[in-house]
């Protein structure tokens, strides 16, 4: 990660690790059941936290939950986390790149151009 803020680096690495974990969970479920798993957020939420899932449905109401939250929770977790990884990196890089203190990287000298040609000596 080249010259992005520490916060953006933290969130990029965090979301990348969560993406790998979600993908590994999908691979594990596929190897266990030999069918493509539904690694969507709603399915994971319902499987691992059933009491919290029921409380959420009761809090929002069945109609609102089915019309608004069910399409959101049907998106695969890997895609959401991958999108958050890319977004956090892009925000971090964009903030540094377009800030006033940005200095572009210097070009490296090629072998044809020597350092003596770049530096002008002034003898006294």
Image (cartoon, rainbow, N blue to C red):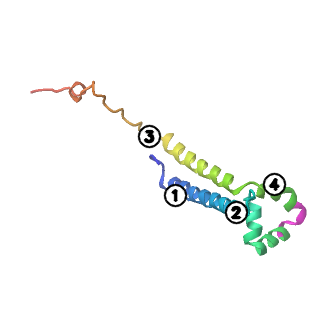
Question: Which mark is nearer the camera, 3 or 2?
Answer: 2
Return the residue at label 3: 102
Helix, strand or loop for disc 4: helix
Question: Does residue 8 appear to the left or right of 108 in the view shown?
Answer: right
Q: In this rendering, is residue 38 above or below 49? A: above
Using the rendered view, name the quadrant where residue 106 is placed.
top left
Return the residue at label 2: 29
Q: In this rendering, is residue 67 above or below 59? A: above
* Distance from Cα at disc 4 to Cα at disc 3: 41 Å
Question: Which mark is nearer the camera, 1 or 2?
Answer: 2
Which tag, 1 or 2, sits closer to the chain's start? 1
Question: Which mark is nearer the camera, 1 or 3?
Answer: 1
State the count of labels.
4
* Distance from Cα at disc 1 to Cα at disc 4: 29 Å
Q: For residue 89: magenta? A: no
Q: Residues within 10 Å of mark 3 (few under 14, many from 20)?
A: few
Helix, strand or loop for disc 3: loop
Q: Quadrant of the C terminus?
A: top left
Residue closer to the observer: 115 or 59: 115
* Distance from Cα at disc 4 to Cα at disc 2: 22 Å
Give the label on residue 10, or none: 1
The residue at 74%/72% (across/down) is 49
Return the residue at label 4: 71
Q: Which residue is farthest bottom?
A: 51
Question: Does residue 31 appear to the left or right of 99 in the view shown?
Answer: right
Question: Which mark is nearer the camera, 1 or 4?
Answer: 4
The residue at 78%/73% (across/down) is 50
- The span picked out in magenta is 59-64
* Distance from Cα at disc 1 to Cα at disc 3: 21 Å
Most prominent secondary structure in the magenta stretch?
helix
């Amino acid at each position: 990660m080249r010259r992005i803020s520490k916060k953006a680096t933290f969130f990029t690495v965090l979301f990348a690790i969560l993406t790998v974990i979600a993908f590994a969970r999908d691979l594990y479920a596929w190897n266990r059941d030999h069918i493509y798993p539904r690694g969507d957020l709603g399915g994971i939420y319902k499987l691992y936290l059933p009491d919290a899932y029921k409380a959420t449905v009761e809090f929002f109401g069945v109609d609102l939950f089915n019309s608004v939250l069910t399409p959101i929770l049907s998106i695969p977790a890997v895609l959401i986390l991958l999108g958050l990884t890319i977004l956090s990196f892009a925000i971090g890089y964009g903030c540094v790149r377009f800030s006033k203190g940005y200095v572009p990287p210097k070009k490296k000298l090629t072998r044809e151009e020597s350092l003596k040609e770049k530096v002008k000596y002034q003898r006294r």
